[in-house]
Amino acid sequence: MGKNGLFIAFEGIDGSGKSTQMKLLKERLEALHHRVYCTFEPTDNPIGSLIRSIIKGHEKADNKTIAALFAADRLHHLLNEKNGLLKKLEEGYIVLADRYYFSSYAYQSLSTDMKWIIEINKKAAELLKPDLNIFIDIEVDEAMSRIRNNRTHIDLYESEHLLHTIYANYQKAFNLLRNEEVIVSIQGDKEMAITQEKIWAVVSPLL
């Protein structure tokens, strides 16, 4: 597999502001004439659409099935010949992803052993590790305040109790894999522009 581009994954609990920061980074990179491809997980392919339906409470599935669906969606995301991550990187794009496998480690291990989650995502990690994982670090109270103020519907994982556990799971996963991954934690409770400058400080040396 050839990889000519740059792959950056944005991670964080719901309400952290990672999607906004990814958009701001895209705009900054494009202003410098870089080709940027933004994507997200779960995807909008059939597997990802089923996952979204489960998250919104329209469908039901047990926890291991949900974890397996995420892993399958991720492989499709990587290998899709039309607009998969590997294809976009080979075309020279800077790829920005709103969630990647660390999200599975943090969220799906709420009720399933994390090592099992890591195992079923091993193929994705073998195919493509991010050049940089950016974790937008924010207090759960602030994240919940943002969710309540900006959302009309609360999803499956968007409760204060669950977000505390998800946050702890992120830290556990980072500790487990700190020797295998490039992970940078950025405070997300400051003004958007301040957070973006901190992100730019770690991204710009990679360009």
Image (tube, helix red, strand yellow):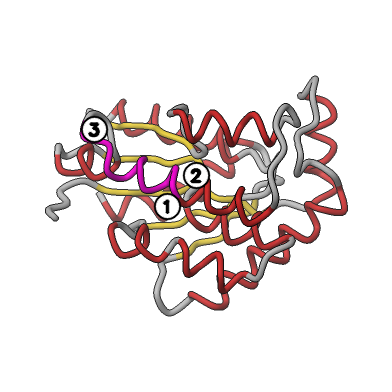
The residue that label 1 is drawn on is 201
The residue that label 3 is drawn on is 34
**Range covered by the magenta-colored residues:** 72-81
Q: What residue appears at the point 65 percent right and 47 percent down from the top-left corner?
A: 188
Q: For the residue carrying disc 3, how many other residues have a C-alpha within 10 Å: few (<14), some (14-19), or many (20+)?
A: some
Of badges 3 and 2, the one in the foreground is: 3
Disc 3 to disc 2, C-alpha distance = 18 Å
Residue type beneath disc 2: Glu
- Residue 126 percent across, percent down from the top left: 30, 65
Q: What residue appears at the point 58 percent right and 53 percent down from the top-left corner?
A: 67
Q: Earlier in the sequence, mark 1 or mark 3?
A: 3
The image shows residue 55, relative to residue 199, as above or below, that is above
Disc 2 to disc 1, C-alpha distance = 6 Å
Question: Could you say which is closer to the camera, residue 55 or residue 61?
Answer: 61
Question: Could you say which is closer to the camera, residue 190 or residue 54?
Answer: 54
- Residue 43 percent across, percent down from the top left: 47, 33
Whether residue 74 appears in magenta in the rendering, the answer is yes
Disc 1 to disc 3, C-alpha distance = 17 Å
Q: Quadrant of the N terminus?
A: bottom left
Residue type beneath disc 1: Ala
Q: Disc 1 on helix, strand or loop? A: helix
Q: What residue appears at the point 46 percent right and 28 percent down from the top-left corner?
A: 46
The residue that label 2 is drawn on is 197
**Is the Cβ of the residue at disc 1 closer than 8 Å to that at disc 3?**
no
